[in-house]
Structure formats: C-alpha cells, structure tokens
Image (cartoon, helix red, strand yellow):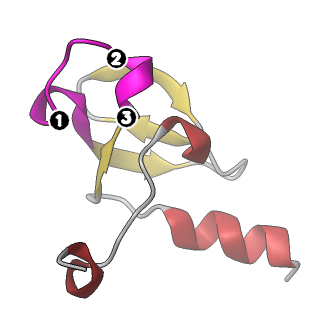
Amino acid sequence: MSNENVKKSVWARPNMNVTFRAELMPGKSREERTFRIVKVLANGRVLLDDFEGEHRENEFEPFRPKEDASA
C-alpha cells in the first residue's frame, strides 16, 4: 500500500465528526460547521450526514486527538 493510500485511510472514518474550516463557512459557529462522516470513498473524499457532495480533507480543520486538544 502506498503512503498516499495509508493517508487516505487514516484521516477519516465513518461516524467521525469533522468541522469545516471557518473561512469556508463564514459567520457559522463551530457547531454549525461540524458534520458526521457517513462514508469514506475510495478517492479519499467523504460523504457527510445532512450535507450534500463529496468533500476533501483540506476543507476541514485538522484533526487533533483528545489528549492533544488541551495542549
């Protein structure tokens, strides 16, 4: 498996919440920009619950594991 395939499989998982970057949704609160991933596609994009279209990793805020969130 190539490094690119490993990256695609790691950045997103079904049922994980992701938050769109603020500059993509100006005026919306963090809560309003957060959606649940329904499906991760083979091309590395995701489908979201209650939000249309395919979305790429760079549209979202970077993921920080909970133990790093307080840092």
Q: Report, in whole angstroms, how far the alpha carbon at label 1 lies from the one at label 2.
A: 9 Å
User: Amino acid under label 2?
Assistant: Met
Instruction: Bin the neighbour count of mark 1 within 10 Å (Cα to Cα): few under 14, some 14-19, many 20 and up.
Output: few
Tell me which segment is drawn in magenta: 22-35
Query: Furthest-bottom residue in view?
Result: 67
Q: Secondary structure at mark 1?
A: loop
Label 3: which residue? 20
Question: Where in the figure is residue 9, as x and y percent of width and height?
Answer: 60, 70
Q: Are circles 2 and 3 on residues that touch, CB within 8 Å?
A: yes
Which quadrant would residue 56 be assigned to in this image?
A: top right
Which sits in the foreground, 57 or 8?
57
Residue 23 drawn in magenta: yes
Question: Where in the figure is residue 29, as x and y percent of width and height?
Answer: 13, 26
Question: Where in the figure is residue 6, as x and y percent of width and height?
Answer: 71, 77
Say whether disc 1 or disc 3 marks the residue closer to the N-terminus: 3
Label 2: which residue? 25
Residue at (47% x, 61% y) in the render = 12
Q: Secondary structure at mark 3?
A: loop
Q: In the image, is 39 to the left or to the right of 33?
A: right
Q: Where's the N terminus, which quadrant?
A: bottom right
Residue at (26% x, 58% y) in the render = 15
Position above or below: 52 against 21: above
Q: Where's the C terminus, which quadrant?
A: bottom left
Label 1: which residue? 30
User: Amino acid under label 3?
Assistant: Phe
Question: Where in the figure is residue 19, as x and y percent of width and height?
Answer: 31, 42
User: Amino acid under label 1?
Assistant: Arg
Query: Furthest-right residue in view?
Result: 2
Q: Report, in whole angstroms, how far the alpha carbon at label 1 lies from the one at label 3.
A: 8 Å
Say whether disc 1 or disc 2 marks the residue closer to the N-terminus: 2
